[in-house]
Amino acid sequence: GESVGLHLPTLSVQEGDNSIINCAYSNSASDYFIWYKQESGKGPQFIIDIRSNMDKRQGQRVTVLLNKTVKHLSLQIAATQPGDSAVYFCAEIRPLTGGGNKLTFGTGTQLKVEL
Amino acid sequence: DAMVIQNPRYQVTQFGKPVTLSCSQTLNHNVMYWYQQKSSQAPKLLFHYYDKDFNNEADTPDNFQSRRPNTSFCFLDIRSPGLGDAAMYLCATSRDASGGTDTQYFGPGTRLTVL
């Protein structure tokens, strides 16, 4: 069946270092992905998205890379800050018949930033 | 600022006592979603509304119901909460103007405790 999974449940990095969070997916037909950040006690917050016609997309301090050959995407955070500490979810987004869309979330990676 | 609002942020109920969670949005999005998120897990879609059309996920228990009286408001009713229903409940919205792949925007969530 379809699945979106993450390689590591917890990632610890030093403040100022770059962080890389990985995500694997199984459905080769998947064509749109989103990364969400969820801080403790809050709802998921949109970070960045990427469609399958792209290999890379950059935002402010974040970059998402998509490798369709191996069905893998990653989120890179430059100069990680304490405020980046959160759980990061990758999610596949698919349109639903009749309107709306469905997010299939990965299991999440807890990013811990050490001072 | 346009946003998704959930009330209350924390809700305590007794085993078997009906409870209603509220979500409102100022984004004027036509799709609203309810998710259940248990500790250390990814959000799980319960159902969604496309305008007034209700769409239930196949594995959502009958104990969970929803109402959407207008574009701005959506309610989650848990008819007889069990201990296993203790979770964070997230509301999200999307515009659904781009072929069904519009970003979902999440509210802050309601943390439900069942005693």
Image: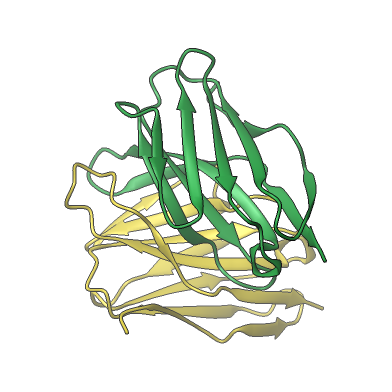
Q: Residue at x 24, y 77 (%)?
A: B70
Q: Residue at x 66, y 58 (%)?
A: A80
**Residue furthest toward the top?**
A69
From this viewpoint, is residue A111 visible?
yes
Front residue (pair B1, A107): B1
Q: Is residue B31 left or right of residue A62?
A: left
Q: Residue at x 66, y 84 (%)?
A: B10
From this viewpoint, is residue B40 visible?
no
- Split into 4 quadrants, where in the image is the N terminus of chain A? top right
- Is B79 placed above or below A64 here? below
Q: Is residue A83 left or right of residue A74?
A: right
Q: Chain B is shown in which shade?
A: yellow
Q: How many numbered marks, from 0 up?
A: 0
- Is A18 placed above or below A79 here? above
- Is B97 placed above or below B2 here? above
Q: Residue A93: where, in percent of width, then height?
A: 40, 40
Q: Residue at x 79, y 66 (%)?
A: B83
Q: Residue B67: where, in percent of width, then height?
A: 37, 71
Front residue (pair B21, A62): A62
What colouring does the structure picture have?
A: by chain
- Split into 4 quadrants, where in the image is the C terminus of chain A? bottom right
Q: Residue A6: where, in percent of width, then height?
A: 67, 35
Q: Is residue A109 left or right of residue A38?
A: right
Front residue (pair B30, B102): B102
Q: Residue A30: where, in percent of width, then height?
A: 40, 26
Q: Quadrant of residue B64?
A: bottom right
Q: Chain A is shown in which shade?
A: green
Q: Quadrant of residue B2?
A: bottom left
